[in-house]
Each structure stands twice: as structure tokens, then as C-alpha cells.
Image (cartoon, grey):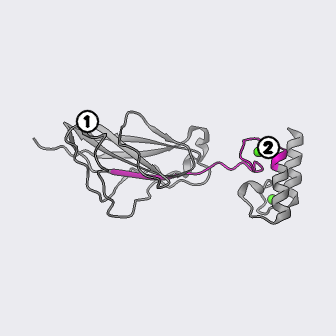
Amino acid sequence: MLMRKITLFLIAVAALAFAAHAGQLSASPGTTTSVEPAIANSLSDLGTQDEPTEQTEPPMFNGLTEDGVQGFGVIIFDTEPDCTIYYRYVFEGEGYSEWMEYTDELWFTEPGHYRVEAYAVAMGKTVSEVYAYEFIVMPIVQPGDLNHDGILGIEDVTTLIDIIISNSTTTPECDVNQDGSVDIADVTDLIDYILAQ
Ligand SMILES: [Ca+2]
Ligand SMILES: [Ca+2]
């Protein structure tokens, strides 16, 4: 029996809550990397097999996001209907997850770097190469929310004052009025905003 060759497409979509940033995303199909596909003798082997790929080239960065993207959904398409897709992912280089059966789009919201890999199995045999997609989920920066609790409050004011007085390293959240510098005007603007809430 001739083995069908199946192509997978890994497509990324932006988080719904921040769809306004979707224009910054690259939605190009996943690019094949030069790896040897896994050969699974049966579906039941998949959960226990050794990591089936050996990277022979640097990873392809084909889905890098821009600032302000809070989450990434990955949808995996195949070119044949009768296959099972398996995927795994690695977050911040901390090691791969187990291979898991793909049933629905995947969502990743924790800020950091992700690599998702997928391949297809039909009739107990691997029928595709391993396709990969990489992306970075960036945290949303709310000016003034220095402690990242989602609220503008007195703790943010005191932290901002401390940073300015001690000349500590600033973060993007410190620039409350978004004028490119961090100074006392940001403190007063933050206080004004809190009082007006
Ligand atoms: Ca806060
Ligand atoms: Ca400022």
C-alpha cells in the first residue's frame, strides 16, 4: 500500500480579547523543519515512544508576534481527512510535553516562547513530516499597573515613587503618560487617574 503523504498546516490566531492586535500577526502556514518523522507502529505506541524528532537545523521562527498579543491559538489543518494528528509543545525551552492527540485548537496565554510540533498518523503509520510553529506570547502592559494585579492603586503609586527616587530600572508600565520618560509627571498622572476612578 502506498503511503499517503499528508501535509499539516499550523496556523496561529490572536487571542480574542485583543483581536485589535491581530494585524500584527503572521498567519503563514507552518514551515517544515528538517527533522526525521516519528515512525509509530501503532497508535498506542505514541504515548510512550521516545522523542521522535532530532532537530538538525535551528528552529524556524515563522510566527513571531508583536508586543500586545496576550495569547495565541494554534489551529492544525491536514490535507487528508482520515488521519490522527499528534502534537506536543515546549514552553521556554523547559522540555517537551508528551505527544497528545489533537482534537481542537490550542490556546497558549502564559507569556513566553512556544514551539508547537505536529505530525499525522494513519493506519498506524506516520504519514507526514513533523511540522513546527513557533511564537511568543507577550504580556499586555497596562501603564501604571506596576504590580500587575490589573488594578491601578496606591501600591502602584508607592512602587513608582520608589523606582524614581532610587533611580531603579524602569519598566514600560512606569511611563504612565506614555511620553517616553519616567518622572514625577507619571506619579501625578497616576494619582489623578486613581482619584478619578
Ligand atoms: Ca496595580
Ligand atoms: Ca512619562
The quarter of the image holding the C terminus is top right
Relative placement, left or right, of 57 versus 164 is left
**79, 33: nearer the viewer:** 33
Query: Which amino acid, by three-letter code, is at mark 2?
Result: Leu
Q: Is residue 162 above or below residue 86?
A: below
Query: What residue is disc 2 on?
Result: 152
In terms of secondary structure, where does tag 1 sit?
Answer: helix
Label 1 Cα neighbours within 10 Å, binned few <14 / some 14-19 / many ≥20 = few
Neighbours of disc 2 within 10 Å: few (<14), some (14-19), many (20+):
many
Q: Mark 2: is the Cβ under 8 angstroms from ligand 1?
A: yes
**Numbered range of the magenta stretch:** 131-156
Q: Secondary structure at mark 2?
A: loop
What's under tag 1, amino acid-wise?
Ser
Q: Nearer the viewer, residue 111 or 73?
A: 111
Who's the residue at 41% across and 51% down the image? Answer: 133
The answer to whether residue 117 is above or below residue 47 is below
Residue drawn at x 84%, y 50% as measured from the top left: 157
Q: Which quadrant of the figure has residue 16?
A: top right
Q: Mark 1 or mark 2: which is in front? A: 1
Sequence-wise, the earlier of marks 1 and 2 is 1
Residue 143 location in percent, x, y?
75, 50
Q: Main secondary structure of the magenta part?
A: loop
List x then y, in percent, for residue 81: 27, 34
Q: Which mark is residue 44?
A: 1
